[in-house]
Image (cartoon, rainbow, N blue to C red):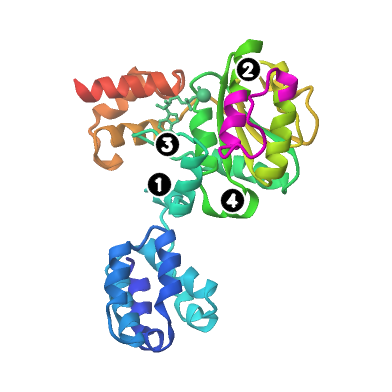
């Protein structure tokens, strides 16, 4: 934790210990992923309310900036506005260079929602693309709870699917805009029967307890109707993510008054569907800095500590301008293993 944050906590320790009730605050911090259940137990085992508070603060002092922020937010949430105000001055600025700031929105709530929705996890070696992720989130916010389409498009391998998954990996966005959750569907290139199967699978997923129908839809039209009812009645205010859409006709089956995020190589796929549409183009060029960032992650070294050769490797692999993410990462992976 930053010295400033730590000092602020120490300075106001007494006031905090005197006033706070720990149980709801800890619930909040656990769901933020900054406190464990066994730590909660330890606090609960203290005999008095004040000793519980003292134990919690002692733990927070040993933790990082994210924990401080979560504690601050919990105070606000639980009605301790005055105490939160005391801590406000100590709120640490999260560095953008270590990529950790994007983790702050990844709470256990987010993890659960994304896992249930079948959203793929981050690649093992991952670099943030803050501007693009921000642009996608802004468009999703623009949907404002109304049906509409947000399209991420760009050439194969430029990172669209990773970006789509990253965009929804955020507590505030999920809670505020899509409290009904998200549902990820890998579409790909399909013929009619392939699409019907995808739709049937989706309907089954959305109707786990079979409260709407026991029988699978028999054709695309029926599946479209079923999907509409399921989204409307069982999963209102949720986001459907259609990954890798190839053909405009496929989208007709989803043109159902839903909120949809989709990835595609073809910008025109949404031309004939109804409702507001927003697009985010993804360039394939990565930039030298991101290339170095990936390289540093692969070899587990700080960017600044990379040897001189790193720059020429990036140039030689043409990782700066020409290759796709996949080729770039494969090349770097090979280099790392050699
Ligand atoms: N932000 C990222 N950080 C690290 N690797 C990435 C990132 N985005 C993409 N990749 C790599 O590139 C590959 C292709 O990305 P993907 O999102 O599947 O591309 P697209 O959907 O545009 O075809 C991924 O499997 C991953 O290995
Ligand atoms: Mg993809």
Q: Secondary structure at mark 4?
A: helix
Q: Please state the extent of the stretch shown in magenta in the rendering.
A: 200-222
The answer to which of marks 4 and 2 sits earlier in the sequence is: 4
Q: Residue at x 19, y 20 (%)?
A: 338
Q: Nearer the viewer, residue 307 or 189?
A: 189
Kindly report the distance in space between the C-alpha atoms of the residues bearing marks 3 and 1.
16 Å
Assign a secondary structure to mark 1.
loop
Quadrant location, the N terminus: bottom left
Q: Which residue is mark 1?
A: 99
Question: In x, y percent, where is residue 173?
Answer: 59, 51
The count of marks equals 4
Answer with mark 2 or mark 1, whichever residue precedes in sequence.
1
**Residue 195, labelled with which disc?**
2
**Label 3 crowding class (10 Å Cα cut-off): few <14, some 14-19, many 20+?**
few
Q: Which residue is mark 4?
A: 173
Name the residue rendered at 38%, 78% in the picture. Answer: 8
Spatial distance from mark 2 to mark 1, Cα to Cα? Answer: 38 Å
Q: Is residue 264 visible?
A: no
Residue drawn at the location 78% of the way across and 26% of the way down: 273
131 or 185, which is in the foreground?
A: 185
* Left or right of 134, for residue 150: right
Q: Nearer the viewer, mark 3 or mark 1?
A: 3
């Amino acid at each position: 934790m930053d010295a400033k944050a730590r000092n602020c906590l120490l300075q106001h320790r007494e006031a905090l210990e005197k006033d706070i009730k720990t149980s709801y605050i800890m619930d909040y911090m656990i769901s933020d992923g900054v406190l464990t259940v066994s730590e909660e137990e330890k606090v609960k085992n203290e005999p008095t309310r004040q000793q519980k508070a003292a134990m919690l603060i002692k733990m927070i002092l040993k933790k990082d900036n994210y924990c401080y922020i979560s504690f601050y937010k919990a105070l606000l949430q639980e009605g301790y506005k005055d105490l939160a105000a005391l801590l406000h001055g100590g709120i640490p600025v999260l560095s953008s260079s270590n990529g950790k700031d994007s983790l702050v929105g990844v709470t256990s709530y987010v993890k659960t929602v994304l896992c249930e929705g079948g959203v793929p996890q981050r690649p093992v070696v991952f670099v943030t693309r803050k501007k693009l992720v921000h642009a996608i989130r802004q468009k999703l916010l623009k949907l404002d709870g109304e049906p509409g389409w947000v399209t991420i498009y760009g050439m194969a391998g430029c990172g669209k699917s990773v970006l789509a998954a990253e965009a929804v990996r955020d507590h505030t966005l999920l809670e505020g805009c899509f409290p009904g959750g998200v549902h990820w569907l890998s579409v790909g290139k399909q013929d009619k029967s392939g699409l019907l199967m995808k739709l049937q699978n989706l309907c089954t997923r959305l109707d786990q307890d079979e409260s709407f129908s026991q029988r699978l839809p028999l054709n695309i039209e029926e599946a479209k109707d079923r999907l509409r009812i399921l989204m409307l009645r069982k999963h209102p205010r949720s986001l459907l993510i259609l990954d890798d859409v190839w053909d405009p006709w496929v989208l007709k089956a989803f043109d159902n008054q839903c909120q949809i995020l989709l990835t595609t190589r073809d910008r025109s796929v949404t031309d004939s569907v109804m409702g507001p549409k927003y697009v985010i183009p993804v360039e394939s060029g990565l930039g030298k800095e991101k290339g170095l960032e990936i390289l540093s992650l692969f070899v587990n070294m700080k960017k600044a500590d990379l040897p001189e050769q790193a720059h020429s490797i990036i140039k030689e692999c043409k990782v700066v301008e020409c290759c796709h993410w996949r080729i770039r990462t494969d090349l770097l992976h090979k280099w790392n293993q050699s």
